[in-house]
Image: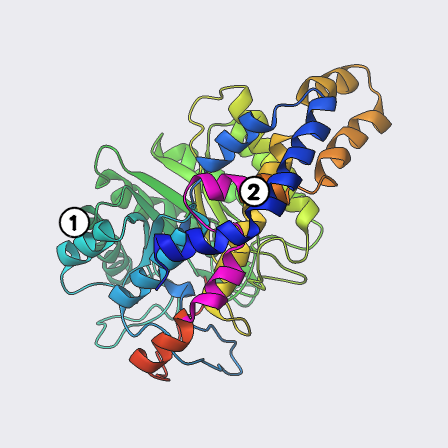
Amino acid sequence: MLTTEFIDERNAAELPHHLTDYQALGERLARRGLDVERAVETLAAFDLAIPSWSLGTGGTRFGRFPGPGEPRNVFEKMDDVAVIHRLTGAASGVSLHIPWDEPDDPAALRGHAAALGLRIDAVNSNTFQDQPGQRLSYKFGSLAHTDPAVREQAIEHNLHVIEVGEVLGSTALSVWLADGSNFPGQMHLRRAFDRTFDGLARIYAALPDEWRMFIEHKPYEPAFYAAVVQDWGSSYLLAHALGPKAQCLVDLGHHLPATNIELIVARLLGAGKLGGFHFNDAQYGDDDLTAGSIHPYRLFLVFNELVDAARDRLPDFDPAYMIDQSHNLKDPIEALLQTVDQVQRAYARALIVDRDALDAYQEANDVLMAERTLQQAFETDVGPLVAEARRRNGAAIDPVATFRASGYRAARGEERGAVAYAPPQSL
Ligand SMILES: [Mn+2]
């Protein structure tokens, strides 16, 4: 259905216009002393991970409105990720959530992924809700719980996730904790943090050699008074005390309004503790909207820090790029195609910043020209650059249009039916 021939055929129809646009962009950048070919090569090597929980329609606490043809199991989710990867050439990773998408046979799932040209990215543990048959409840926390038996259960779960991840070929564990309190006085603020560190240290000790642990902070929700790992400072304290394999994960939606996220990224980069990202966007709180849909300039400024860090060859610079969104209204595959495109655009814009000029303006305290250098890159239409990177990877010049023309969703609707697959929420 979405064969190489089909994609090539669709691309062929767009090729004359595309090449004209690409050449024009190359000439415009050359006048600024920038090499479009170098940017295309770097962008073509970019790759991110799709979370297993994003292939079905999400929901809110008020309801969920699923569409036909959603994947019924983790194998079908892989099939959908393969479609996203074929169309974008930049989504070969799958980030699995345990237990939501725990396979009965992890080796078989690894084989299925490999056959589709996919790899298993970070595995995510879950101690923020109780599973059927679970012995002890996480109602009052997991690693931070007052009861050592609950803490032990949470540690055991994380060790199990590492074991499953090893069979799957993963090399990273993402830990997001819902631990916290809703009311002043409910939880001893200092001791809860110490208990969390002790639990993470046990998990850290079990990490295989080449593995990393990503610690994901979040200011509130479900803890509405005091979250235990509420900000990058707490995350950094934990990662620093745990050791070199522990790093901080920046979910773009896990910050209070008006927080300067690119500044946090710069701080973590400087400390060698930037583990990776969960891309999404937000107007108010942890809205899990499509990346770049609300604050595209911020997404560009985040990538600007990353391109700058790569240029300075910072040690320990190897961020894991993941998506974490909830697709409540859009077709999940289309929303993910749009997301990958938006992230690629932000990266492309950062790649065409005139860094020598920016350096000089910063040194000379030329405020206006320094800002204008960033704006000039952001305001450039990088569509042809992104399309060219995709084309060279054998992917689609226009992923969403190609997906719609393929009839993939309708065919899956016939095959999978309008099932009400249990809705994992986004994290
Ligand atoms: Mn997240």
What type is the residue that disc 2 sits on? Val
x then y, percent, for residue 101: 28, 65
Foreground residue among 409 and 68: 409
Q: Which residue is mark 2?
A: 386
The secondary structure that most of the magenta stretch takes on is: helix
Q: How many marks?
A: 2
Dot 1 or dot 2, earlier in sequence: 1
Image quarter (top left, top right, bottom left or bottom right) of the N terminus: bottom left
Q: Are marks 1 and 2 in contact (CB under 8 Å)?
A: no
Residue at 40 percent across and 58 percent down: it is: 6
Q: What scheme was used to colour the molecule?
A: rainbow
What type is the residue that disc 1 sits on? Val
Residue at 67 percent across and 49 percent down: it is: 296
Q: Secondary structure at mark 2?
A: helix
- In the rendered view, tell whether residue 96 sits above or below residue 173: below
Foreground residue among 75 and 17: 17
x then y, percent, for residue 67: 45, 80
Foreground residue among 268 and 181: 268
- In the rendered view, tell whether residue 50 sits above or below residue 244: below
Q: Which residue is mark 1?
A: 167
* Image quadrant in which you'd find residue 34: top right
* Image quadrant in which you'd find residue 359: top right
Residue range highlighted in magenta: 388-407
In the drawing, does residue 224 fall left or right of residue 118? right
Callout 1: 10 Å neighbours few (<14), some, many (20+)?
A: some
In the drawing, does residue 111 fall left or right of residue 148? left
Residue at 74 percent across and 19 percent down: it is: 357
Distance from mark 2 CB to nearest ligand 1 atom below 8 Å: no
